[in-house]
Amino acid sequence: KKWVYTFGNGAAEGRAGDVAILGGKGANLAEMASLGLPVPPGLTIITDACALYHKNGRDLPEELKLQVMAGLHGMETVTGKTFGGSQSPLLLSVRSGARASMPGMMDTVLNLGLNDRTVEALGHDAGDARFAWDSYRRFIQMYADVVMGLDHELFEEILEDEKGRLGHEYDTDMSAVEWQHVVSLYKKLIEDELGEAFPQDCHVQLWGAIGAVFASWTNHRAVTYRHLHNIPGDWGTAVNVQAMVFGNLGSSSATGVAFTRNPSTGEAELYGEFLVNAQGEDVVAGIRTPQSITEAARLASGSDKPSMEKLMPEAFSEFLAICKRLENHYRDMQDLEFTIERGKLWMLQTRSGKRTTRAAMKIAVDMVEAGTISQEEAVCRIEPSSLDQLLHPTIDPGISRPVIGSGLPASPGAATGEIVFTSEEAVAAEAEGRRVILVRIETSPEDIHGMHAAEGILTTRGGMTSHAAVVARGMGIPCVTGAGSMRVDMRNKVLIGVGCMLKRGDIITIDGSSGRVLKGEVPMTQPELSGDFGKLMVWADNLRRMTVRTNADTPADARAARAFGAEGIGLCRTEHMFFEGDRIHVMREMILAESERGRRAALDELLPMQRSDFTELFQIMHGLPVTIRLLDPPLHEFLPKTDGEIVEVAAAMGMPQTVFRQRLDALHEFNPMLGHRGCRLAISYPEIAEMQARAIFEAAVEAARITGAPVVPEIMVPLVGLRSELDYVTEVIDRVAAAVAQETGMEIEYLTGTMIELPRAALRAHVIAEAAEFFSFGTNDLTQTTFGISRDDAARFINTYQRKGIIERDPFISLDFDGVGELIRIAAERGRQTRPELKLGICGEHGGDPASIHFCEDADLDYVSCSPFRVPIARLAAAQATL
Ligand code: PEP
Ligand code: MG
């Protein structure tokens, strides 16, 4: 079996398309090498080896080892250096590279191949002993941490002590001899702590590092990251072993990271940062604040540190040409890593760059307009759920507040919250429903839990490509990094800003679009959804087959949904209207009435309220379809619960408390979600359905008169399991329709249909369709009744199920294709057998979930209906589902 793919010197065994076996990094290194770009030679061990490594008790097959040795030999030939050689030693980097990018989650070892012998040779070759010893101590520190499991803090302590003892402020003040001494201290530390020596044999080092990278696939933070990003655990990582190039060989050396376009705004301008005389990880780690690559960016930032364009003009122009070439080649914005070793440019990585949604939109639209990609491709390049990012509020432009600090606009949107200083605090606060801003000097992969829990992130160190910035953009969380004018005092848990000192729990606002930090809460405005967004949505709308409706109960919801492009209402839950203002009192009177007469009296009061609600909804929807569902929830939901409320309501209704309590007890149910609800209410109390039907028809007549647009209400009966249930309620509706038509002299067109929320209804769909003109899959209840898992109690254990691998996704969020989905397919098929023109839609929460929308497309539904803010997501997902 071919375990190892080599690359370098203008050739490669792999290609960009081999991501599944070579991982993203390996596949793109191969592609760059074949394009003839300057890539240090190397080899990639395929992702399959990762699973094998874990299965074989952390060992690798002999065949693989031989292939690595052969590849290594090739690297020696290309570089003219020898691995472990006493002259011209070849040093290696060993890095992970999975199919999907998992920034910083897995381990890396640099400068591998150094030992007491080769360090001398390296110093001789480079003409710089100081560099060699510095590299050696870095290597020991990294190797001990990653391979031997010794905390790197212990090494930092030794270094700090030594610097203190020598009176040095910076690492750069250290001399060769001083580094050499640090190396001896490091080696001693390892022996003392682990009882074994730091390995001098370079091959032992190499296999140790390769094993550690495979092992890091299952470390805690990688597992968490995969969980958050739905990356399958069985993919495994590849390992890339590559000849080292050095960005820390003096002032003509540098290392950097760049995007071919601005990853925040999508502007077509090279955007990046570099550090002179530094090694790769220094930029990403955010330890030093880096310099701009282009002069334009330097000027814009007002920095006085020179740009790469000015400092290293030759390397810069070569780099610029490579950027253009790679972007054209991949037809997408690229994220690049490079190193300049004594003036010579080397490319270390290229991949499709992570970007904000706003940038993704702009880049996609620009590329369509430049003829680079098609409209279909553009539509496919936007992750539907990421549209959420665009819905982030921004700080009201008219507001002036004291700015207490400012940093880099690392991830757009504004956020307000209480200050917390640790990820644990952020997670705990979120669990209590508090909104927090995570404030750190810098973040590390260990913080992803806390970052996820926070509304926003503020760091005082690091650039646009620091860990905090990259991760926040990916998560769509507002973030400000490198707020150098502010200081975090972790010991005393305070944030010191301009003219103020804030403690944990104090409120701040960050603006990830401008980089400002403000004290207290600040008024915000909602973003405009036009421009690129509008164009992309038009393209998506042209592609999609399904209609997108909204679940809206109030005029405000309906208006918001229209603005987001909803093409009708798929579900109006009428019960929500009974909670508005004083209506709840009348509703309670109705429920607690002891006779039909009492109920009718209360219903007479409710009628005009419902009618005016429906009239308004019909007007807003202006001829678009509106589906109104009859009363669904168990009645006790409307009743008072606490003693205080009970006393108050009883008094207001003029009922003796004992009688009142008896009525309450009579309405008590052991399992209300499976109890007296849905169409069962309409069958017990047809007068309720009568009132609602009347309100709907009268409103339809009125709205049609006002707007001149015909209104065709769709009346939906909930929780039907039997055809006879639907027949009974439909008969009530038809009777009222006839009455209203006669009273108003206006013939009303309408549809009656049912929700499919019970397995029985799905299975008997061919029979139910005889009585229904449409089906709407209520997948919240259908999931509940199919799994037999209470939708209100699932949260207590679904997380545990996911963590233990019992289920992959929460079926209440993303449709269970195999079970619930099967019922939907059966119902759709059987229903259409009876009635080919049967309209089919979905109105559970799944109607706004991209994966579930894909399913609906495949099941040939006519529409999806979702909450207003998810309408744009559904429009995009429905378009992608057709491609
Ligand atoms: C459903 O059950 O999926 C549904 C839309 O109805 P509700 O959530 O109101 O029960
Ligand atoms: Mg339901």
Image (spheres, rainbow, N blue to C red):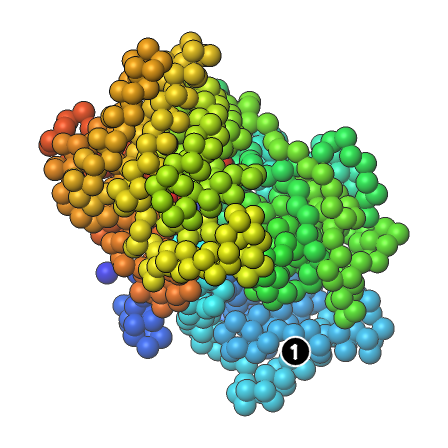
Q: Would you say 402 lies left or right of 325 here?
A: right
Crowd class of label 1 (few under 14; some 14 to 19; many from 20; radius 10 Å): some
Percent of width and height locating residue 50:
35, 65
Q: Please say if 13 is above or below 322.
A: below
Q: Please say if 757 is above or below 121.
A: above
| Residue at disc 1, secondary structure | helix
Q: Residue at x 52, y 47 (%)?
A: 653
Q: Would you say 662 lies left or right of 713 here?
A: right
Q: Residue at x 18, y 48 (%)?
A: 760
Q: Residue 577: in sight, yes or no? A: yes
Q: Please say if 488 is above or below 749.
A: below
Percent of width and height locating residue 64:
31, 66
Percent of width and height locating residue 610:
45, 30
Pick the residue in front: 93 or 838.
Answer: 838
Amino acid residing under circle 1 = Leu
Q: Would you say 806 lies left or right of 334 here?
A: left
Q: Residue at x 42, y 64 (%)?
A: 796
Res. 792 image quadrant: bottom left
Q: Residue 236: in sight, yes or no? A: no
In the rendered picture of this protein, how many numbered marks are placed on residues?
Answer: 1
Q: Quadrant of the N terminus?
A: bottom left
Percent of width and height locating residue 804:
36, 68
Q: Residue at x 29, y 25 (%)?
A: 736
Pick the residue in front: 527 or 643.
Answer: 643
Res. 204 image quadrant: bottom left
Pick the residue in front: 290 or 848.
Answer: 848
Q: Quadrant of the C terminus?
A: top left
Q: Please say if 334 is above or below 750.
A: below
According to the image, label 1 marks what residue?
A: 154
